[in-house]
Amino acid sequence: MKKNLLLFVLYLFIFHLGYSQNIKKNDSLKELLITINPDSLQLKSQVYGNIIWNYATTRIKLDSARMYNDTLFAYSKEASFDKGIASSHYYYGFINRLEGNHKEGLEYLEKYIDYARIHKDSTKIINGLFQIAVIHSNMGNFSESLATHYKLLEIYKSRKNKNSEAYELQAIGHLLRKVGKHKEAIEAYEDAIQLFKETIIDKIGLSMAYESLGNTYSELKDYPKSENFYLEALAYAKSENNSDGIASVTENLGNLFYEKGDYKNALEYFSEALNARENMPSKRNIAISLSTVGKTYLSLEQDDKAEEYLLKSMTIAKENDMKPELVGIYENLIKLNKKQNKFKNAFNYQTAYMVINDSILGKEKMNQMLELNAKYETEKKDTQLQLLKVETEQKEQQNRLYFTLAIAGLVIACLLGFFGYKNKKNNTILAKQKKLLQVALDEKNTLLKEVHHRVKNSFQIVSSLLYLQSENMEDKEGKLAIKEAENRVRSMVLVHQKLYNNEELVGIDTKEYINDLVKDIFDSHQFQKETITYELDVESIVLDIETVTPIGLILNELIINTLKHAFKEVNSFSKLNINFAKANNQLVLTVRDNGKGFEGEIKSSSFGIMLMKALSKKLKATLKYNSTIGMGTVAVLNINKFSQLS
């Protein structure tokens, strides 16, 4: 008995070590486990629970947390220790929440709450409901999360725990903001502040509530009110020397001034946030503060300082695999190096940015696809069970039919009615199968959309490479050739961008595509004071990618040839007309200018002309020119091979 008492005192001492020493604390707790009497189930369960909690809250030792929880569950089950089993259910729910396994987390937490309700343990009910509310919020089920938080609020009111009630109101306020109910969120925060002031004055709680009000008014673009509430929050945080609160509020103040364009004040607050975080364990927050300081120096045109802080931030983010933070850091480093004409560095950062951004998007898409697949498999199994049930019922009906054949017309009438009912039921099953097919089609569309997105990104990398190469070239002809190649790539990028943004995923509207392509070409090729005007008359026809891509490339070449050669001097009368329509089972593209015109034949040795001939051959098209000196040139492309979708 005395030994167990001494072990319990030692356990309490270890449990109250600082959070930053969680892993070291677990080493001591593991040693303590060895000395505990196997019959001391309560103490053993508490020690296991704290080891699990310490590993889980580091968020980098979740496998260790799960392993110790497996042990807790196994020995509790073997000893029929219900309290230990319930605790393991809670920790399974918490670990699954951190891993993003929402469904499994909810199942374990529901078991934990069932145990708590049977034993009328309100503290366990509160803990379980809180974790459930967080999971629903993470899943985007904000209405479910709000409903759970309101249940918690009622529990705290019944217990007359005003301090906990105030913190719960803050959680409700955060969710109300997420669903766009800012007015109700403000009321929740104000109620929380009143409760904090009615009890022992919780200055940290007040700092958090005032900061939340500042965030809400910032979202509403009411910057004067937002600043006042932030300053109120900062005063309370500083009065308690609360480093977390100081860092959070000063960072929000920095963001506020940065958004207003007051970079000097923004830098002051961002620097204060960085100073508060430098001695904290969170590398992510330090990287964010370094990045915001670097970004602000860049806006203040202090490039050396900007580079120093951005590189420090990048180093920490790389070491700790902070991909979302690296995206913002790379964006600012690209901007900085382009400004300094360091195009090689800019290209390297651009490449790293594209790789990480694509990785993040790919992960999001993969999670969506896995979720869709899980839903599909669940519905598929449900359908199979229903079909099996139908088959069983049909066999039973056959047996009944043999039995009832000897019965008179009344029984026959009943059977006819019954089969009518069965037919209706089978129709319902067929409708569900149709729904499953639609789900499968949606999955394929998702995959196809991802393919177009990745192809578009690949073309954009090629375009960026060509752009950076042209910036470093001094040879004008070479630079012009690379520029033309860049335009050809951009015409193909536009095709895949349209497909990615199109719900149908298989067709391109010619009116929308040609309008965007022509505008893009003219925006990037007119550098004289007087600009060539253009007029479009394009029929809306939906064509497949195999038809649209060569048409876009040919149109690109025709327009660029016109801009380069058609006009000796550009004046207010210089004009280009582009027509596209379907006539006599052909697609007809006409490009007309009112330039100087030419005599003789078109030189067929240039790459652009050779490209147009090759593409015309693919479309089984003829490309003809008609030009008159002083009157301009007309190019007509008659397309015989095309695939029209609507």
Image (cartoon, rainbow, N blue to C red):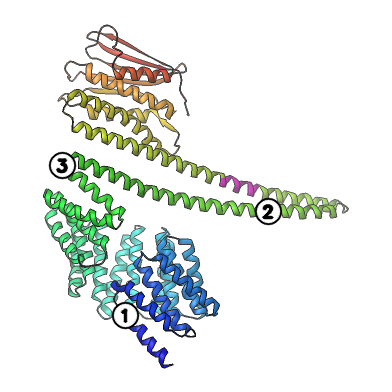
Residue marked by disc 3:
339
Asked whether the viewer can see residue 501, the reply is no
Residue in front for this viewpoint, 523 or 193 = 523
Q: CA distance from mark 2 to mark 3?
A: 68 Å
Residue marked by disc 1:
16
The three-letter code of the residue at mark 2 reads Leu
Residue marked by disc 2:
388
Q: Secondary structure at mark 3?
A: helix
Of the two numbered discs 2 and 1 in the rendering, the one whose residue sits closer to the viewer: 1
* In magenta stretch: residue 108: no
Magenta stretch in the rendered image:
427-436
Residue in front for this viewpoint, 147 or 9 = 9
The residue sitting at 63% across, 46% down in the picture is 430
Label 2 or label 3, whichever comes before in sequence order:
3
Disc 1 crowd rating (10 Å Cα; few below 14, some 14-19, many 20+) is few
Percent of width and height locating residue 438: 54, 44
Q: Which mark is residue 526?
A: none
Percent of width and height locating residue 102: 45, 61
The residue sitting at 17% across, 24% down in the picture is 476
